[in-house]
Image: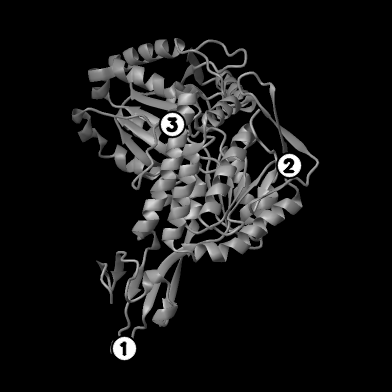
Amino acid sequence: MFEVSGHNYIAGARSAQGSTTLQSHDARTGEALPYHFHQATVDEVNAAAEAAATAYPIFRQLSAARRAQFLDAIATELDALDDTFIALVCQETALPAGRIQGERARTSGQMRLFATMLRRGDFYGARIDRALPDRQPLPRPDLRQYRTGLGPVAVFGASNFPLAFSTAGGDTASALAAGCPVVFKAHSGHMATADYVTDAITRAARKTGMPEGIFSLLYGSVGEALVKHPAIQAVGFTGSLRGGRTLCDMAAARPQPIPVFAEMSSINPVVLMPDALKVRGDKIAADLSASVVLGAGQFCTNPGLVLGIRSPEFSAFLERFSALMSAQPAQTMLNSGALKSYCHGLDNLHTHPGITHLAGAAQQGNQAQPQVFKANVSLLINGDELLQEEVFGPTTLIVEVADHAELLQALHGLRGQLTATLMVEDSDVATLGDILPLLEQKVGRVLFNGYPTGVEVCDAVVHGGPYPATSDSRGTSVGTLAIDRFLRPVCYQNCPDSLLPDALKNANPLSIARLVDGVSCRDAL
């Protein structure tokens, strides 16, 4: 049996005050696993939030190099988790071992990426406008700005990425990089996994001398108490539109409103341009079907909508794509709740008068059957809500348009998305002059001749988008720009040099690039 305590983790100590217990389940069989978890009480939520508030002034003032050391140590601890851990995650999520091993590498890799960014120092956004005492008609004071952490952050674990978007995932990594302690709410679908990863984070914190309270883990229905706690200054969330909106509304109703960075809902349109279908329609059909069913369709970037202009080539593509999707095997989803939600989404599509079922075996048993539907373009143009709802699972909708003008109308009808994909040949590029600017207003990432289910973790990537893809389109939950969500600017006016943070001191002890009097430089002043 795995060593899982089932206790909440508050400021490095285990706590089990509550009498209500939750149980982990085998995702494939539905059988209860021998791990019980104590739902956190209100007192435990308070203790975790207050411990984070106590740790915050100490943690945020540690050097970026010290925080980088902590993130590197977390990465090392994650990489050291053995095969028993991998087997446990597979058991809780029904995801294959290869996927979990890859996700662990991504999770430790993004910790190291944030550590590299901290050492680089550009996250400070340091700006200095030196005094101009002789300026007329009024002198200018010395003004210096940098960015610092907001404060304790509540992070909610995602169901579909038990590692990369959960306990030590991107929200946690970016918050810790910003100098913000984290209070983490475990997802009910992989509580034992969260226990293991929290142990790893705690070991790393102790080895690197981090303050107590820098990370806490809570189980159960604690979302409202956590978001409303006055010590919490921001929220990171990945999940459903309904869940994200609920958290946003709670945060906005606080006496002191706080930002919620929620990734919620996206159908990720794929636009098939005519010449691309002429040249490689069969390959697009094969690759697209593989993308739709990847991981049982349980990716936030799963291609849930495909648009193409009516033509013989589009008809041939549709026939081929439907046949390939019909041949795809059923897959086990993350948990029974995910399957129930998937079946509900399919029922809505089946009963809609403007939507036709094209391919896929009837849904039965405890596995998700891949499906293809075709919708009348008028539904998209006229804002039919069902076409905009994400069906989380291995299914997609086809929309056929009459011509380029109708394609533009259909794209105008889209709500905000994480991604949009354009399948093009060089000869199609000249027709994109009005499409690409429109997509820029609709999505966070525009792909050319790729598939959205791969999200690179790097400096340039954007994993965000206009509502309802996210609650705030100015941020990203993947890549180093994610740190921006948990930073705020502070300006010092005529401050003595000895009192300035290192990022703004005349000597530039950090040797970082700074904007000085409008010019980027690394020199001392």
Closer mark to the observer between disc 1 and disc 3: 3
Q: Quadrant of the C terminus?
A: bottom left
Instruction: Name the residue furthest front.
Output: 207
Residue visible at 44% across and 49% down?
72
Q: Is residue 119 above or below residue 144?
A: above
Q: Nearer the viewer, residue 260 or 173?
A: 173
Front one among 117 and 474? 117
Cα separation between marks 2 and 3: 31 Å
CA gap, disc 1 to disc 2?
A: 61 Å
Location of mark 2 (residue): 39
Of residue 456 and residue 297, the one placed in the foreground of this image is 456
Mark number, residue 133: 1
Question: For residue 287, which quarter of the picture?
Answer: top left
Residue 360 sits above or below residue 415 on the image:
above
Q: What residue do we see at 19% from left, 30% from top?
A: 426
Image location (x, y in percent) of residue 381: 44, 32
Looking at marks 2 and 3 on the same chain, the residue that comes earlier in the sequence is marked by 2
Residue 50: x and y, percent? 67, 60
Say what amino acid the circle numbered 3 marks: Gly
The amino acid on which the numbered mark 1 sits, given as a three-letter code, is Pro
Residue at the spot of label 3: 102
